[in-house]
């Protein structure tokens, strides 16, 4: 964080908080004066989170020279699993390494059970579109698959994951800039709140089912535990390891969720897709030509309101 980029109120807030932390932690003598305004970036509202997909974030920044300051860095800075380039397998690998080496490491100061209040990983679910007419926005299958893989690494505990739903502008390939993403229904308000609530309910239900699958008692038969997620021959085959079977379960759940999510705006006359596209155009401030060129958007413009967005959760998760 460049101190010069902060406004007056942020500078004052930062100075006061550092002064209090110095008194509380007794670290006044160990803080280099020329970097005081760089140390506690989490003290500024909307602070940059720790992106667990970046390998350099396995360690705290070098200017956290005091253990009290470093612990506050881990305790107070949000964690985010940025999924902009989730199709690149190394992204998920980096995130899993962060979880293993930091959050689940019993000797690390940032291990989950030391952080109070409890920390969550903000996982991004992105609705992607390049604003090309006739093409549809989508939540990619790898985006959903990676969610369940992360859940598995976290021991199947859904309470460790907070889902963030965002629109993603994919006109520039590999763009990870904050300006390429816009939050959907901030504060759960506006016309998108129902769509967001349906997506959240579906994914939370699926994550809870995976948690129950992991916790199934050993007394339950193989067919009862695995039967609905794979062929019965695979479910009862002792040669297939539990690790491989859990992978099949995650693939089944990701496919089921992805299919239901796609149907929310892919099905129907095009007005449903137009509803999503129109809100994406609004979110990113596109000019009128984009609206006029897309027939789905024009369908929605000619019949505004909130269309019914079907999501038959009971089809896969009764």
Image (cartoon, rainbow, N blue to C red):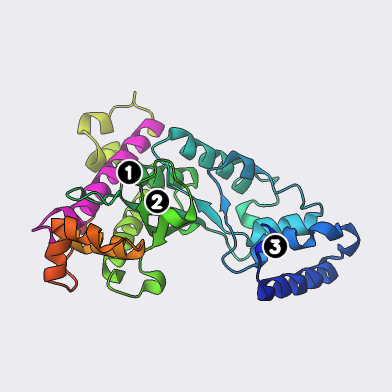
Please provide percent x and percent y for residue 29. 91, 61
Q: Residue 24's spot in the image, x, y percent?
A: 82, 70
Residue holding disc 2:
211
- Residue 15's image quarter? bottom right
Q: Which residue is mark 3?
A: 4
Quarter of the figure with residue 35: bottom right
Query: Would residue 140 be found to the left or right of residue 260 on screen?
Result: right
Q: Position of residue 303 (x, y in %)?
A: 12, 71
Secondary structure state at the residue bearing disc 2 = helix
In front: label 3 or label 2: 3
Q: Is 190 in front, or is 152?
A: 190
Residue found 79% across the figure and 73% down from its top: 20
Q: Main secondary structure of the magenta part?
A: helix
Q: Earlier in the sequence, mark 3 or mark 1?
A: 3
Q: Residue at point 35% right, 46% down?
A: 171
As measured in the structure, the alpha-carbon distance from the residue carrying label 1 to the one carrying label 2 is 15 Å
- Determine whether, in the image, residue 310 is placed left or right of residue 208: left
Of callouts 1 and 2, which one flags the residue occurring earlier in the amino acid sequence?
A: 2
Give the magenta part as a residue range: 243-271
Relative to 215, say whether 31 is above or below: below
* Label 3: element kind: helix
Magenta-span inclusion, residue 251: yes
Dot 3 or dot 2: first in sequence order is 3
The label shown at residue 220 is 1
Discs 3, 1 touching: Cβ within 8 Å: no
């Amino acid at each position: 964080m460049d101190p010069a980029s902060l406004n007056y109120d942020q500078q004052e807030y930062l100075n006061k908080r550092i002064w209090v932390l110095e008194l509380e932690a007794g670290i006044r003598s160990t803080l280099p004066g020329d970097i005081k305004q760089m140390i506690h970036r989490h003290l500024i509202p909307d602070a940059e989170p720790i992106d667990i997909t970046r390998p350099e974030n396995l360690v705290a920044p070098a200017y956290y020279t005091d253990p009290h300051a470093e612990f506050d860095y881990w305790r107070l800075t949000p964690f985010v699993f940025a999924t902009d380039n989730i199709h690149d397998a190394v992204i998920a690998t980096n995130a899993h390494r962060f979880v293993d080496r930091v959050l689940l490491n019993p000797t690390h100061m940032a291990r989950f059970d030391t952080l109070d209040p409890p920390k969550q990983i903000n996982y991004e679910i992105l609705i992607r579109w390049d604003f090309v007419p006739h093409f549809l926005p989508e939540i990619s299958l790898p985006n959903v698959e990676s969610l369940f893989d992360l859940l598995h690494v976290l021991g199947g505990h859904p309470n460790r994951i907070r889902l963030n739903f965002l629109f993603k502008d994919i006109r520039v390939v590999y763009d990870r800039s904050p300006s390429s993403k816009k939050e959907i229904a901030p504060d759960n308000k506006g016309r998108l709140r129902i769509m967001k609530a349906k997506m959240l309910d579906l994914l939370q239900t699926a994550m809870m089912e995976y948690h129950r699958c992991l916790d199934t008692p050993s007394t339950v038969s193989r067919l009862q535990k695995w039967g609905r997620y794979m062929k019965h021959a695979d479910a009862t085959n002792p040669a297939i390891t539990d690790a491989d079977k859990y992978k099949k379960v995650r693939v089944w759940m990701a496919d089921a969720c992805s299919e239901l999510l796609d149907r929310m705006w892919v099905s129907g006359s095009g007005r449903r897709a137009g509803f999503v596209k129109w809100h994406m155009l609004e979110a990113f401030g596109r000019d009128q030509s984009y609206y006029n060129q897309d027939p789905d958007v024009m369908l929605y413009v000619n019949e505004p309101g909130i269309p019914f967005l079907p999501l038959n959760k009971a089809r896969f998760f009764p």
